[in-house]
Image (cartoon, rainbow, N blue to C red):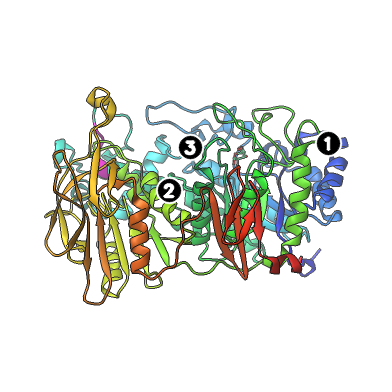
């Protein structure tokens, strides 16, 4: 069949991982019948099928997959074809045990679960590409082929590998990055603790050491491993582009995943897709999930993306796995649509009977068709079919950006820092306040032009290059509102301290510098008494996590610390620029952070309303979504929304 027979899918993606090879043939007919009942449009196939596709070295068996393709095609269902490279077969691992990953303490991780390989293995890459080529040659022009799904959740279980092969690749990467050993020594600060190297060959990955590891070595290893995984992605993508240039390529991201710098990975893809498993037992989950959707939209430059996996109900990998109560799955699915997704996929179509994931929910549960979960599967399929008018539409451009920086994430959470802080918590606190006010956010990458935003927030972005700092400073000088939170621009992007009060280029637009860090002790260290911070002024009340001595040279003090060692010290400052912009500095985590967010939004002339608890309002295309994640009815404006319900503009309902 030729490529010209492919017709673009004009509906939402709806379906899930489909693993028929794990089931006897008699189940396959039922699968198709029930998929049609559920209005499934796309099935992700062959994710973990390498051993079935290539049972022996170089011997491919495509018969079963041909049949799966034909059955799906006959039913009008498209295929998101995985390249099956996420779980190498046992014959390959046994022949080449050097491809197995090794931990920082030297333990080799064995065959018997999945992802038993490391990304720097030449043998792995060679065999993976041979499989990808065979799949592309076999199915590249099949009319049911909708997209390529490279690997699966790249780096999910093995982010860092310490094998000899990775060590050698790390040395080559370092040569490339630093050029000569003197530059590396300077960048890593190896004069400290007698760590100088006289040759690249002496360098190892940061394995377990007696005391703190070299921070530069660790950061470079984080970068190197992210690049190594991206190389696996790129190698497959390049081959697929050569063989099937018209078939779009994705790989499933994992939301805010520390192991991979998704800003750089995203460049390899034709469209972004994401896996997200919000915990039904966690009240913060809806807001956190919204944040991940906004990251995906940002990674795709505003273009639609696909929610590639979510659980129809419970997962199997938490200590206790809460089921999704009725309505929750639909709610989170429509949250993704509202925030720019063009498809809703789940893990997985049919709940497994056997294996490590048999207690993970599926669209079709163990108990069969006559179940709440399957009824919800069917009704969600029908609802998404009715939303086809939204396909290809976008959310409005956000006026607020939050800087998101993987380098800072790695750096902030290293050992031997002033306090152990979570980068995601710091970012989420700001995001959450904007979410509660119905303000759409985009994430921005360090160094990118920020001209389109009226408000830019950089918090916990501890290690920024001069270029990134300058770009942030420019927000103020061109009239925008820049909010800088504590532990931002303390270091450059080689982890050298910005001397003279930190902040570098930001000092002049903020009108402050920082003299000393004074994070409060943790309750456990203070014998149980929780040391409290308090501030007066804007956002008055309790504060937590961080305190410091801020020295003001050219800014108003909007809030100050009350009591304790920091009594009277500035906690929140603002410097208004001649151009009308302002640089805000926030030196702690106030409980009333929302008041500060509101003040910044007002200064930028951005409309906002504090919404009822657990309620979300988002626009996409010409439509407005009001999502009520709470268990009580709420009223937004004149509109009443039932518990765990979603209301979409009537304009759209007419179009359905
Ligand atoms: C990940 C994987 C899936 C499955 C799910 C379970 O998202 O990609 O194969 O294991 O987790 O939640």
Above or below, 130 against 317 in this view is: below
> Looking at the figure, which quarter contains the N terminus?
bottom right
At numbered mark 1, what does the secondary structure look like: helix, strand or loop?
loop
Q: Tell me what residue is drawn at x 79 percent, y 55 percent.
A: 77
Above or below, 203 against 307 in this view is: above
Q: Which residue is mark 3?
A: 158
Mark 3 CB within 8 Å of ligand 1: no
Count the numbered circles shown.
3
> Looking at the figure, which quarter contains the C terminus?
bottom right
State the mark number for residue 226.
2
Q: Which residue is mark 1?
A: 370
Residue stretch rendered in magenta on the structure: 212-216
At numbered mark 3, what does the secondary structure look like: helix, strand or loop?
loop
Residue 255, horizontal then vertical, whole percent: 51, 48
Q: Earlier in the sequence, mark 2 or mark 1?
A: 2
Magenta stretch: helix, strand or loop mostly: loop
For marks 2 and 1, give the CA distance. 45 Å
Q: In the image shown, does 113 or 496 lie closer to the viewer?
A: 496
Residue 212 located left or right of residue 126: left
Residue 378, horizontal then vertical, whole percent: 78, 47
Q: Residues within 10 Å of mark 1 (few under 14, many from 20)?
A: few
Q: In the image shown, does 376 or 202 lie closer to the viewer?
A: 376
Residue 240, horizontal then vertical, whole percent: 62, 58
Above or below, 146 against 188 in this view is: below
Mark 3 against mark 1, which lies toward the viewer? 1
């Amino acid at each position: 069949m030729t490529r010209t027979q492919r017709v673009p899918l004009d509906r939402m993606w709806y379906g899930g991982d489909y693993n028929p090879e794990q089931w006897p043939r008699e189940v396959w007919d039922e699968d198709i019948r029930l998929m049609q009942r559920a209005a499934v449009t796309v099935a992700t196939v062959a994710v973990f099928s390498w051993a079935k596709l290539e049972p022996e070295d170089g011997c491919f068996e495509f018969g079963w997959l041909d049949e799966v393709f034909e059955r799906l095609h006959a039913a009008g269902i498209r295929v998101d074809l995985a390249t099956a490279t996420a779980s190498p077969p046992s014959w390959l691992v046994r022949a080449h045990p050097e491809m197995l990953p090794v931990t920082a303490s030297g333990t080799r991780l064995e065959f018997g679960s999945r992802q038993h390989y490391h990304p720097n293995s030449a043998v792995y890459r060679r065999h993976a590409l041979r499989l990808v080529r065979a799949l592309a040659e076999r199915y590249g022009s099949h009319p049911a082929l909708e997209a390529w799904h490279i690997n699966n959740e790249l780096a999910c279980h093995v982010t860092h590998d310490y094998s000899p092969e990775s060590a050698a690749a790390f040395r080559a990467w370092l040569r490339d990055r630093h050029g000569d050993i003197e530059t590396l020594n300077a960048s890593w600060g190896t004069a400290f603790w007698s760590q100088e190297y006289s040759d690249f060959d002496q360098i190892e990955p940061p394995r377990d050491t007696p005391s703190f590891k070299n921070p530069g070595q660790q950061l470079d290893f984080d970068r190197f491993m992210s690049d190594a995984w991206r190389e696996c992605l790129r190698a497959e993508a390049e081959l697929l582009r050569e063989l099937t240039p018209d078939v779009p390529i994705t790989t499933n991201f994992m939301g805010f995943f520390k192991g991979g710098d998704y800003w750089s990975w995203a460049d390899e893809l034709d469209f972004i897709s994401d896996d997200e498993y919000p915990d039904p037992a966690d009240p913060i989950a809806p807001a956190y999930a919204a944040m991940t959707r906004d990251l995906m939209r940002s990674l795709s430059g505003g273009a639609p993306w696909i929610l590639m996996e979510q659980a129809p109900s419970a997962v199997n990998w938490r200590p206790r796995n809460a089921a999704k109560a009725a309505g929750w799955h639909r709610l989170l699915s429509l949250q993704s649509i509202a925030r720019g997704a063009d498809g809703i996929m789940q893990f997985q179509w049919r709940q497994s009977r056997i294996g490590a994931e048999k207690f993970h929910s599926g669209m079709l549960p163990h108990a069969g068709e006559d179940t709440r979960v399957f009824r919800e599967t069917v009704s969600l399929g029908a609802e998404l079919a009715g939303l086809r008018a939204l396909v290809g539409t976008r959310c409005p451009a956000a006026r607020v950006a939050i800087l998101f920086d993987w380098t800072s994430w790695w750096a902030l959470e290293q050992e031997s820092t002033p306090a152990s802080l979570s980068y995601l918590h710091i970012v989420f606190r700001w995001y959450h306040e904007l979410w509660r006010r119905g303000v759409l956010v985009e994430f921005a990458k360090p160094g990118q032009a920020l001209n389109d935003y009226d408000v830019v927030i950089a918090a916990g972005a501890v290690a920024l290059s001069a270029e990134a700092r300058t770009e942030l400073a420019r927000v103020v000088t061109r009239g925008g509102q820049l909010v800088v939170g504590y532990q931002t621009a303390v270091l450059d992007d080689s982890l050298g301290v910005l001397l003279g009060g930190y902040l570098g280029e930001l000092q002049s637009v903020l009108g402050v510098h920082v003299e000393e860090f004074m994070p409060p002790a943790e309750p456990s260290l203070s014998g149980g008494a929780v040391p409290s911070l308090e501030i007066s002024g804007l956002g008055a009340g309790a504060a937590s996590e961080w305190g410091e001595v801020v020295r003001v040279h050219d800014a108003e003090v909007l809030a100050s610390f009350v009591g304790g060692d920091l009594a009277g010290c500035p906690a929140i400052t603002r410097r208004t620029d001649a151009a009308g912009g302002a640089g805000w500095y926030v030196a702690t985590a106030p409980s009333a952070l929302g008041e500060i967010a509101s003040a910044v939004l007002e200064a930028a002339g951005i409309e906002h309303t504090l919404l009822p608890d657990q309620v979300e309002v988002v626009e996409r295309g010409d439509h407005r979504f009001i999502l009520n994640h709470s268990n009580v009815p709420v009223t937004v404006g004149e509109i009443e929304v039932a518990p765990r319900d979603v209301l979409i503009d009537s304009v759209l309902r007419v179009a359905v």
